[in-house]
Image (cartoon, rainbow, N blue to C red):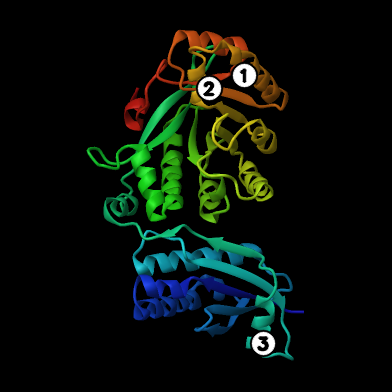
Amino acid sequence: MKKVFVIKILGVDDLIGRFTTLVAIQAWHKLIADIKLSSFLNNGQYTLEHVNDVEHYLFIKQSQPVIDKNSTLNIAEMMIKTLENILGITANRVIKVVIFEGVYSADLSIDEQAQKILSLKPIEIISSSYGIATGELEEILRFDRIQSYLQPILNLQTLKIVGYEMLSRGPENSPLFRADKLFGEASKQGVSRELEILCIKKAITLIPKLGKGIFVTANINPNFLNDPRILKLCRQQHLNGQFKLELTEHLPVDDWQELRQNMSKYQNENIDFWLDDAGCGHFGLETIEKVNPAVVKFCITLLNHLKDNDDIIPDLKSVVQKVHNMGGVVLAEGVENKRQEEILKEIGIDLVQGYFYSKPDKSETILAN
């Protein structure tokens, strides 16, 4: 039996509202032309049997008995990227590429087979963060004008630097310089995913400049882990275990089972996960148990309570012990004074960062020293 799959693009019609009918049609035809010239269809394993210009799907037959899923993912990623390049936009929130798998039947027409296959559950959905960045944010994303700042992370017992958290900033003297302004504007324009991918790229480029065994962390929204571009970026680099991803609590997790499945793909690439801001927002002890991160970062708000409330110390100590029992490490961020440091040692904290040790500074300044 010959396997076939249908690749359907969702969101093309929405482009008409954002651009014009002519632009959307031209983009679709240019996309199909590029696909026909791609190595995907010129390696003898696949044939493009039919293109439906109305419902925007491709019917592809494979000569091999089993469909190569990696190849289908590659062509899906290429389709999204091609549309982005054609339309001259930074990212796509509307566009999704959905892959369906079926068995070829000579008794049915291609359109009949396609409709039958499209009624099945898709084997993969590839999407990106569609939003048309405008103004200065569009310039920042298009020309990679993110600045990377680093804040040291220290071993609390030795007070030696073991790694850095990368913090992203906009251009100097820009209204988007501050992280809250930069990421707030990205969220407003619908390009948060694209901004986070750019920040991860920045963090990875720092690794060759770090000392042996020194790591760098970068934040990521848990719901973005399903983006194949991020995993592909990590796989293309020699990270040597020096790159960590911090799951942020900016948004609640949509699907914990899917999150753990996505995490395992990165863990297979020797990338550890950290849980940021535990104790605040959506992340608590229950989340720690679900995620089982390599490092748990205590929320800065908890440390602020240490100034005038020693009653929470036993509770913090209990949480630290539970994390240790799970094989994890605990980091306290936002350390501002000696009193906090003494308490953190008392309750068994492993790693620290904060103004008491060092303020964030430009990566080139930190690494030059």
Specify whether 204 is left or right of 111.
left
Q: Position of residue 50 (x, y in %)?
A: 57, 85
Element assignment for label 2: helix
N-term-proximal mark, 2 vs 3: 3
Give the residue at the far left of this rendering. Answer: 173
Q: Residue at x 40, y 30 (%)?
A: 150
Q: Position of residue 86 (x, y in %)?
A: 37, 70
Q: Position of residue 110 (x, y in %)?
A: 64, 87
Q: Measure the C-alpha gap from mark 1 to mark 2.
A: 9 Å
The residue lying toward the viewer, choosing from 188 and 333, is 188
Is disc 1 surrounded by few (<14), some (14 to 19) or many (20+) residues within 10 Å?
some
Q: Is residue 267 above or below residue 49?
A: above
Element assignment for label 3: helix
Q: Residue at x 51, y 45 (%)?
A: 237
Residue highlighted by disc 1: 316
N-term-proximal mark, 1 vs 2: 2
Q: Measure the C-alpha gap from mark 3 to mark 1.
A: 62 Å
| Quarter of the figure with residue 284 | top right
Comparing marks 2 and 3, which lies closer to the viewer? 2
Residue highlighted by disc 3: 112
Comparing marks 3 and 1, which lies closer to the viewer? 1
Q: How many marks?
A: 3
Asked whether the viewer can see residue 231, the reply is yes
Question: Label 1 is placed on what type of residue?
Answer: Leu
Is disc 2 surrounded by few (<14), some (14 to 19) or many (20+) residues within 10 Å?
many
Q: Residue at x 63, y 41 (%)?
A: 267
